[in-house]
Amino acid sequence: MARAPAPALLCVFSGLPGTGKTTLAQRLAREFGAAYLRIDTIEQALRDLCAVDVQEEGYRLAYRLAEDNLRLGVSVVADSCNAIDITRAAWEQIARNHGCRCVNIETLCSDRAEHRRRIEFRHCTVSGLRLPTWAAVEAHEYHRWTRPRIVVDTAGRTEDACFADLLSDLKEERGQIPLHLPPAAPNG
């Protein structure tokens, strides 16, 4: 008898620019075959196509796209700074509206010098997007977290190590999070 598929899941990545959230979010979306929504891409498309001075429109459009996918039973990985409590609450409400679980994942780089190097030397992957300067990142509004979340500190660590820790943290919550995790490798 076939097992019923797990309900859709909303994984919301948060963190300042240059902390590794896009790298990890894209990898998680690939791993689980989830829809991937990147706020940078959505906001730049609004600027390019509609000549909009983007404020909250990118998030609001992403919420709608997430709802469409969750309604279909497709899990979603959302990639954004998600820097303020109101956006964090909105993502969680979307998951509740669709009977899904929301997992907040915060990325950070606790090594200030490494974080700065990442900002100053990274390459843009969204056509037309102007990457923030280190001064802009330092000045970025970022509310203190009051909600449960998985925290991944990427300082001094490889992408593979960070991703392995993220998967481990997700597996620890397996009883609470219905994920289709890859089977454990056989021993021996």
Image: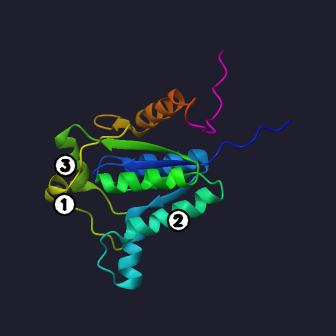
Find disc 1 in the rendering and name its residue.
Answer: 133
* Residue that appears at 61% across and 38% down: 178
How would you rate the neighbour count of disc 2 (Cα within 10 Å): few for under 14, some for 14-19, many for 20 or more? some
N-terminal of the pair, mark 2 or mark 3, is 2
Q: What label does residue 116 carry, if any?
A: 3
Report the Cα–Cα distance between label 1 and label 3.
9 Å
Q: What label does residue 65 carry, if any?
A: 2
- Is 65 on the left-hand or right-hand side of 21? right
Residue 167 location (% of width, % of height): 50, 34
In the image shown, does 183 or 70 lie closer to the viewer?
70
Residue 74 location (% of width, % of height): 62, 54
Q: What label does residue 169 carry, if any?
A: none
Disc 2 element? helix
Q: Amino acid at mark 1?
A: Thr
Question: What residue span does the magenta drawing correspond to?
Answer: 177-188
How would you rate the neighbour count of disc 3 (Cα within 10 Å): few for under 14, some for 14-19, many for 20 or more? some
Q: Quadrant of the C terminus?
A: top right
Taking the image as drawn, is residue 150 in sight?
yes
Chief secondary structure of the magenta portion: loop
Q: Amino acid at mark 2?
A: Leu
Outermost residue, top direction? 188
Report the Cα–Cα distance between label 2 and label 3.
32 Å
Outermost residue, right direction? 1
